[in-house]
Amino acid sequence: MRIAIPEANPALSIGASLGVTFPFQRDRRRAALSRDGQIGVRLAMSIGPTKLVVIVCEEAVESLIGPDLLAAGAKGYTVCEARGRGNRGVRDARWSLSSNVRIEILCQEQAALRIMSMIDTKYCDNYGLVMYMHEVQASRADKF
C-alpha cells in the first residue's frame, strides 16, 4: 500500500500554527515577459548604482578602522578573513600576527571618497593595506 504525503511549506505551517505573519512570507514576485515571449517570474526589487570600497589590511588594524569608517559616512561594513601574497610576503593567517582581513563598505560616492582619503591619510604609511573602489549595482541602493 502506498501513501502519498504532500510536501509541506514550513513557512505556511509555522505561520498558520502561530497565527503570525512573518515578513519573509510576503510574495514579492511579479509576472514578467521574457524576450522570447515566455511568462516568467522575477523579484520586484530596486537596483541602483553605489560604490563598493574594499580594504585589505592587517587584522590588527580592523579595530582601529571600524569606528573611523562610521565617522566618515559608512552606514556599515563587512569583514572577512583574507590570505594572499604581496610585497610583504605571504599572508597566510597561520600566525595571528600575519593574518589579513578584507573590509567591504557599500556607500554613496561622497562617503567612499571620504573613507579612502581618511584611510590613506591615517593608516597607509604605518600599516600594510591596499584599498580600491568599484562602481556596483546594489539592491536597495538608497539604503547605503
Image (tube, rainbow, N blue to C red):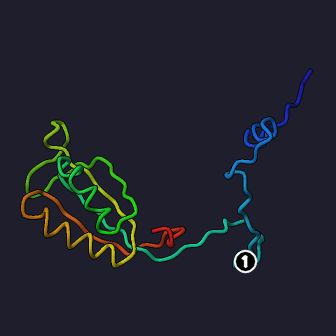
What residue is rendered at 39% in x and 75% in y? 108
**Taking 35 as reference, is 97 above or below it?**
above
Left or right for 38, reference 68: right
Q: Where is residue 7 in the image (x, y as percent from the top left)?
A: 80, 37
**Image quarter of the N terminus:** top right
**Taking 34 as reference, is 130 above or below it?**
above
Residue farthest along the front direction in this orientation: 71
Closest to the observer, 24 or 98? 24
Q: Which residue is identified by label 1? A: 36
Residue farthest along the top direction in this orientation: 1
**Taking 13 as reference, is 142 above or below it?**
below
Image quadrant where residue 73 sits: bottom left
**Image quarter of the C terminus:** bottom left
Left or right for 114, reference 33: left
What residue is rendered at 26% in x and 49% in y? 82
Q: How crowded is mark 1: few (under 14 residues within 10 Å), some or many (20 or more)?
A: few
Q: Position of residue 140 (x, y in %)?
A: 54, 68
Left or right for 32, reference 78: right
Left or right for 40, reference 119: right
Q: What residue type is labelled 1?
A: Asp
**Taking 135 as reference, is 126 above or below it?**
above
Q: Position of residue 120 (x, y in %)?
A: 16, 69
Q: Where is residue 39 in the image (x, y as percent from the top left)?
A: 78, 70
Describe the element under mark 1 as helix, strand or loop.
Answer: loop
